[in-house]
Image (cartoon, helix red, strand yellow):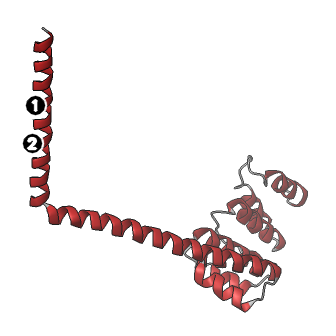
């Protein structure tokens, strides 16, 4: 029986080798048939990953330049070279820097120009801050309660106590401004 097992083992080995050769021939035939498509896919994939790596490196380089310029502007805010680099490499950070500097300088003109920014946070904050500097009321998503409070305060200064009370009553009791609003309502606005 030992010989029979050896013969079966050899037969299985040969049939396994035949299957490997058969698959190799099928693979070669498939390769010859679709050689151009396979190479196009391989080249496309290589080009994609190389392009992506280059673009990522360029983006990273721009961010590094912008960060260096921003840090330089923290030391010297009027450095024209750093302002130009920041504006070219990271416009969003430039707008944030411009907003910060305009608030420090109380520059209503710059704030009004920033209120048309594509960045909704910068636009809303600039619009609100410019309106506060101009002592006007403006709707704000970020500073909704503060906007209502300023409106009530300005109405109170103008002598319109009823409008001030109505405006201040719009501030939610859970708002951080509720306590201040309550003080303002109770200490200055007296019902007739």
* Residue 82: image location, x then y, percent: 70, 86
2 w.r.t. 88: above or below: above
Q: Residue farthest to the top? A: 1
How many numbered dots are placed on residues in this image?
A: 2
Helix, strand or loop under label 1: helix
How would you rate the neighbour count of disc 2 (Cα within 10 Å): few for under 14, some for 14-19, many for 20 or more? few
* Residue 69: image location, x then y, percent: 70, 80
Is residue 95 visible to the viewer in this orientation of the structure? Answer: no
120 w.r.t. 73: above or below: above
The reply, left or right, for residue 147 in relation to residue 32 is right
Is residue 112 visible to the viewer in this orientation of the structure? Answer: yes
How would you rate the neighbour count of disc 1 (Cα within 10 Å): few for under 14, some for 14-19, many for 20 or more? few
The reply, left or right, for residue 68 in relation to residue 13 is right
- Upstream in the sequence, badge 1 or badge 2? 1
**Quarter of the image where the C terminus is located:** bottom right
Helix, strand or loop under label 2: helix
122 w.r.t. 176: above or below: below
Q: Residue at x 12, y 53 (%)?
A: 28
* Residue 94: image location, x then y, percent: 65, 79
Residue 15 marker: 1
Residue located beneath label 2 in the image: 22
Q: Residue at x 75, y 81 (%)?
A: 102
Query: Which of the pair 175/59 is nearer the observer?
Result: 59
Q: Quadrant of residue 163?
A: bottom right
C-alpha distance separating marks 1 and 2: 10 Å
Residue 191 marker: none
* Residue 20: image location, x then y, percent: 15, 39
Q: Residue at x 79, y 71 (%)?
A: 154
């Amino acid at each position: 029986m030992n010989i029979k097992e050896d013969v079966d083992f050899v037969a299985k080995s040969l049939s396994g080798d035949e299957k490997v050769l058969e698959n190799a021939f099928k693979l070669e035939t498939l390769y010859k048939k679709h050689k151009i498509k396979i190479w196009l896919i391989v080249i496309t994939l290589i080009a994609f990953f190389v392009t992506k790596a280059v673009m990522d490196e360029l983006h990273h380089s721009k961010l590094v330049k912008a960060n260096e310029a921003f840090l330089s502007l923290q030391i010297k805010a009027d450095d024209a070279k750093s302002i130009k680099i920041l504006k070219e490499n990271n416009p969003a950070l430039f707008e944030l820097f411009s907003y910060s500097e305009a608030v420090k300088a109380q520059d209503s003109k710059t704030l009004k120009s920033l209120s048309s920014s594509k960045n909704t946070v910068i636009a809303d904050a600039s619009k609100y801050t410019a309106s506060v500097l101009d002592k006007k009321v403006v709707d704000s998503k970020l500073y909704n309660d503060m906007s209502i409070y300023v409106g009530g305060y300005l109405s109170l200064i103008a002598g319109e106590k009823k409008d001030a009370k109505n405006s201040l009553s719009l501030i939610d009791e859970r708002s951080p401004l509720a306590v201040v609003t309550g003080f303002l309502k109770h200490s200055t606005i007296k019902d007739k």
